[in-house]
Amino acid sequence: MAQNIYIAGVEQRSGKSVIVLTLMELLSGETSKLGFFRPVVHGDVEDDRLINLVLNRYHLDLPYESMYGCKIETARELLASNRYDELLKIILIKYKNLERQCERVLCVGTSFSEAQVAIEADFNADVANNLGCLLIPILQGHGCSIDEIIDTAASYRQSLKEHDCDILALFINGVDKRYIDDLKDYFMHQGAKHPVYLVPMIAALEKPTLSDIASDLKAKVLSGDNETLKRNVLNYKVAAMQVPHFLDHLEEGDLIITPGDRSDIILASLMAHKSAKYPQIAGLVLTGKQEPEPQITKLISGISKSPFTILGVASDTFTTAIDVTQVKAVLDPANERKIAAALGVVESSIDIPDLKQRMSSTYSNRVTPMMFEYELIQRAKAQLQHIVLPEGKEDRILRATEILVLRGVVKLTLLGNEELIRKKIQALGLQLEGVNIIDPIKSSLRKHYAESFFQLRQHKGVTYEMAFDMLADSSYFGTMMVHLEDADGMVSGAVHTTQHTIRPAFQIIKTKPGTSIVSSVFFMCLEDRVLVYGDCAVNPDPNAQQVADIAASSADTATLFHINPRIAMLSYSTGASGMGKAVNKVREAVRLSKQQRPDLKLEGPIQYDAAIDMGVAKTKLPESEVAGLANVFIFPDLNTGNNTYKAVQRTSGAVAIGPVLQGLNKPVNDLSRGCTVTDIVNTVAITAVQAQMNGVVSENSST
């Protein structure tokens, strides 16, 4: 059994939250039942920020009270009465109860108070040893010179020798980028048994958000929404002057602090936000327990979308300005942007394969949705692909684009009116300054693409003029980008219909040689495994040959995503027990599949219960190597497949990723118009992995 891991900050504000998230990402990709534990929590029960961050982000199916040893008051009482061992036993018992429910547990040590750093460092070392965990210490490198970092690391290593801790790795957080290379060389030549990972300062974590400020100041949100509350505050300004001079001092990301009766400042801030001549402020804090005049409140409430957050506090302006400067940035589980930015920096700074190898000596065979999604992201990042998104001005597409860019998953191009997209990016407060945007109508590529499309479709009566007009459509333009290798894949459908997305692909990219039909699969991520369902989105009533081709394509897709295919060709009867047109079609499809792809493990006709339930399989098909173990399910028609995947999704809580198109020469994938930002991220990652495989096939064929 793999050892569990204990993270301990060595100093105050060591930045352990982002390291915790990085380790959670890695572990959630390795195990289906992950636990999280803190030996001591501060404040009220259910108020530990780190536990709440992990619970909300990773949806751990664990009661809150099982995830900590005791409250700080209990710990202090036991320590004061010299009952140190009793404290360790309380923590150990709670930990062991949690460990029995989990395959791996990530433990995070206590938070430090200034007067107790040395005491708590010893305490964390003792707890890690008593829990049998590998230790990951985190040092703070922010504001430190190279010599100071080296001295701190040496001192801490020496103290750990006294506790005989097993160290997995040492992290030094917030290091000045100028020192990274020199420090790497120094630690490399020290010959330590464990690696030293150097993480540069993460700009996204240095600045608090409006949400952080609202929480710390216990402010009332007068205007704004969840998205505006996520914006970073870069500067603080007290607005005590007249409007003309106030406007002269505005900077990007300002938080404006002003009395609540300063209607002129409120209106000027709203106007400045709408003006292209002024920078975008982060928000307003109205002080003195004075809300805006009723007319101003009415004006703000009539704006369809709040441009920024407006907070109200009871304290005076001077006190509020001091309080605001004391607010520290925290990682909020709802702020995917900040989390993605932080993870992107940490993941690019450490040797992920080496750390994974060190973290795990045994692996679970089960695959959960989080494990599957984690693997998708990591595989996509391994070989960057260029994906084009035709729906460039759609909010969900833009939010997903930011996450993908911050995580370094793919290279992206957005299609649409560049000015409108830039305005939408600014209005949403996203970090997409360098994203590639192409306007199909104005692009210099349009003539070239039109000529190529004309050559492809002139036999269908398409003239050059018609082709040029059609290339104004972002779906056709994006498909031509993929066809002419200006992009590796395309994802669309958040706004467009399925036909709008795939019709250009049928006309331009076309099907792979030997494949009679383009089809789709859904990855159905259940609690402990991933199933493949095909075809649930494209073909209403495929014939026997087409069903056989769908089975072959689905098996290949499953294999591409590390699922060893065991295929069930579904029908309303099992084996030779039934007759009729529908079951005969499946029976013929099975015959064709076995003839054309004898390498596949395949069973049919078979009913769903016999395919997935070992008990039923032993009764109906006891000799089958697929029955009861199937993981690729081929439906006889769209009606059956679409209803089944939705029924399973809604009743079991499964995550349905797809539809993923298969059978095309190059990857083009469709989104549901009800898709979430997470759905888009996953589909783009899947498209990237498909594109990687296309590249491998192309290289092999060329050699």
Image: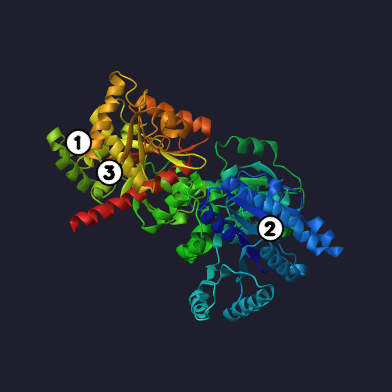
* Few, some or many residues within 10 Å of mark 3 (<14, 14–19, 20+): few
Upstream in sequence: badge 2 or badge 1: 2
The colour mode here is rainbow
Q: Which image quadrant is residue 383 in?
A: bottom left
The answer to whether residue 575 is seen in the rendering is yes
Report, in whole angstroms, how far the alpha carbon at label 3 lies from the one at label 2.
Answer: 62 Å
- Nearer the observer, disc 3 or disc 2? 3
In the drawing, what numbered circle is on residue 599?
3
In the drawing, what numbered circle is on residue 327?
2
Residue under the point 20% across and 48% down: 448
Q: Which image quadrant is residue 234 in?
A: bottom right
Mark 1, residue position: 466
Expressed as whole percent of the image width and height from the top left, the position of residue 96 reads 68, 53
Callout 3 amino acid? Asp
Expressed as whole percent of the image width and height from the top left, the position of residue 110 reads 71, 61
348 w.r.t. 525: above or below = below
